[in-house]
Every structure is written in C-alpha cells, then in structure tokens.
Image (spheres, rainbow, N blue to C red):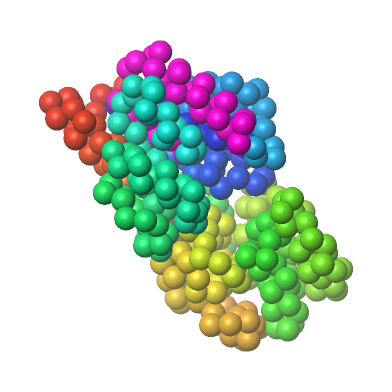
Amino acid sequence: MRIALISTPFVSVPPRKYGGTELMVHELAEGLVRRGHEVTLFGTGDSTTAAELRWLYPEAQWPPNLMADVNHVTWAMQQVREDGEYDVVHANSAPAIALTRFVPTPPMVYTVHHVREPELSSLYEHFPDIYYAAISRDQARREIQLPRLEVVHHGLDPERYQCRDRGGDYVCFIARFSRVKGPHTAIDVAGAAGVPIRVAGEVHGADAEFARREVEPRLERDHVTFLGSTGMREKIPLLRDARALLAPIEWNEPFGLALIEAMLSGCPVVAFPRGSATELVEHGVTGFLARDAAHMRDLIRYGGPLDDFDRWRCRERAAERFGRDRMTADYERLYERAVSEARPSAPLARIA
C-alpha cells in the first residue's frame, strides 16, 4: 500500500526532546516501512526516517503557529495531488481535513491527538467521510459522535527501552510544567514520602506564570534533582532506574506517551485516575492508580508495593498492549477499511 503520512511542521520526526504527536508518527512510519509499505512522510527537513522524507520547512517551526501549519499542510496536500498514486492519506494536522474540499485525495485517516475542542469538533462534524482515529476510549467518549471513529492506542518500539530487575531509590516526573500535568504535586508527594525525585520537563509559553509560581521554587528543594528537557538518550536510563514514574494529572489526558515509555522500561506508573490513565495503567501490573496525593505518597514509600514490583512482567504486558507492531497493525486495518469502502474493487494492499 502507498501511504502519505502528514506530520506537523512544529517538531522533527522523531522529536529531539518534546513532541508526542511526532513520536507517534515516527513509530508508525518505521512500522509501516518494516511491513513492506511505501510510505512518504511529510515532515520537517531535520527529521530522520526509513520512509521517503519530504519537507517544506528545513527545520522545525517552534513554537507552534497556525500559519506555519496551514502552509505545511497545503503544500503536503498539493504534493499528494501531484503524485496521484497514494492509496490513503494519514493526516495528523486538522487543516488537511478542510482541504479535502478542494484537493481530490485518496481516502483520509485523521488521528485526533487532543482533548475535545469545540472549534475542531465543529470542523469534524462537517466531514463525516474522514476516518477518524481516537487515541483512547476515554477521548472518544468525550468527542462528538462521528460515523467513522475507531480507537487506536499509541505504540512504541519496545527494543528502544531498557529494563532491570529492580529500580533505584528515586521516582521521576517527565512532562511539561503545566498545572494539568501536576509537577508541583509530584514534587510534594515525593517529599512527603521521603523519596528523592528527578524532574524532567520544560515550560511552554502559556504555563510561564504557573511554572514561575508553583514549580521553580519547588525545584530548589533538597529532594529534587532538576534535569531540564530530556531526549531519548537521557530518558532511557532515567526510566530504567526509576522506582516509579509519577503522573498526578489534573485533566482528562487523551493519552500519555510517557506512561507507556515507563511501562516498557519496567518502571511502574503511579497516576491519578483521570482521562486515559484508567485504561493505560493496569493496577498492580503496570502501575497503580492513586485516589489522591496521600494515597500516591503511600504507594511510593519504601516498604510499600513498589519494593516487590515485577518490572519484567510490566514490560512484557506493556509490549503486548502498547508495542509498535500492534499500533501498526491497527492502522493497517483502518487503512484497508478506508480503501475498500472507497474503491470496493481495488486490492486492499500494494506491498512494496
């Protein structure tokens, strides 16, 4: 099958540090190529991929802005039209949906990466022929009803992550410094439990005041080690050796890639039961769901359930549920459905 995979112009594929959507796009591109498909990735020029790479912007356009997104996506859709030989287009940026009115394209799959946003939901409502992929059941339940909506959990390559029999003496937090991610709570919980915490993340513009007031003073505490923004090189040993990853989220997060990165490292996730966390974390197997901060404190204390946690079982279960091969197979089935319903007589796959 020949597939046009459209990423964003904001972060390279794979991301050097921050970038959830772009990490998922990278894993999918690699998985599809390994399974014999012809994949063209429309990303930024500083991306690295086994697929054919095309770009309008030589470098990632950060911070995100609408005009860069529109420019990138309209260019990518023009390329798709001029090539004229794709079986399916998989977009990860909303402007691509609206462009289907003007640019004749093969069937389109679109992954919804965000919480419900009224403006975007209104757009989706006008394009019922798009094949939408939600990234969790919780996210799908909160979105408007769409006639073609399937749930496809993200997946990562388990071989990129390392595991050991026992974790170290510290817990960790990996996320942007936003209230909804709970960095302040993670630091407070670790301190109350008497456990060191290593904090990895950065501040995005909208969160600057919160970070200045609630996070930066806490980073000076004795039990805290601040690592800054981390890439894969730093993240792999951090998760491999951590006692647990803390995710005291305060929002209905559609998905948590850092959670499955931890699980694939054998590192248990201790999270509040919000959003997708309830379907990602298997209590006692890949982590624990904490009722509140006091419960999270008790779970991570020395002498608690983390002491005897089976890290290899955690990794095995995470690879089964959230491995790249599973995600790739799920998207293959969605592509095949889109192609067969658009052109019933066409072959379902054209393998390279």
Q: Which residues are magenta?
A: 66-92
Q: From the image, give the main secondary structure of the stretch colored magenta.
A: helix
In which image quadrant can residue 101 be found?
Answer: top left
In the displayed structure, 144 sits above or below 78; it is: below
Residue 329 showing in the rendered view: no
Determine the residue positioned at 82% across, 62% down.
Answer: 212
Quarter occupied by the N terminus: top left
Location of residue 338 in the rendering, given as x and y in whole percent from the top left corner? 25, 36
Quarter occupied by the C terminus: top left
Location of residue 255 in the rendering, given as x and y in whole percent from the top left corner? 49, 58
In which image quadrant can residue 308 be found?
Answer: bottom right
Determine the residue positioned at 76% across, 64% down.
Answer: 210
Determine the residue positioned at 35% across, 42% down.
Answer: 126
Location of residue 40 in the rendering, given as x and y in whole percent from the top left corner? 44, 24
Q: Is residue 224 left or right of residue 160?
A: right
In the displayed structure, 343 sits above or below 166; it is: above
In which image quadrant can residue 340 be found?
Answer: top left
In the displayed structure, 102 sits above or below 184; it is: above
Determine the residue positioned at 68% across, 56% down.
Answer: 176
Q: Is residue 211 left or right of residue 80?
A: right
Frontmost residue, 336 versus 132: 132
Frontmost residue, 268 versus 192: 192
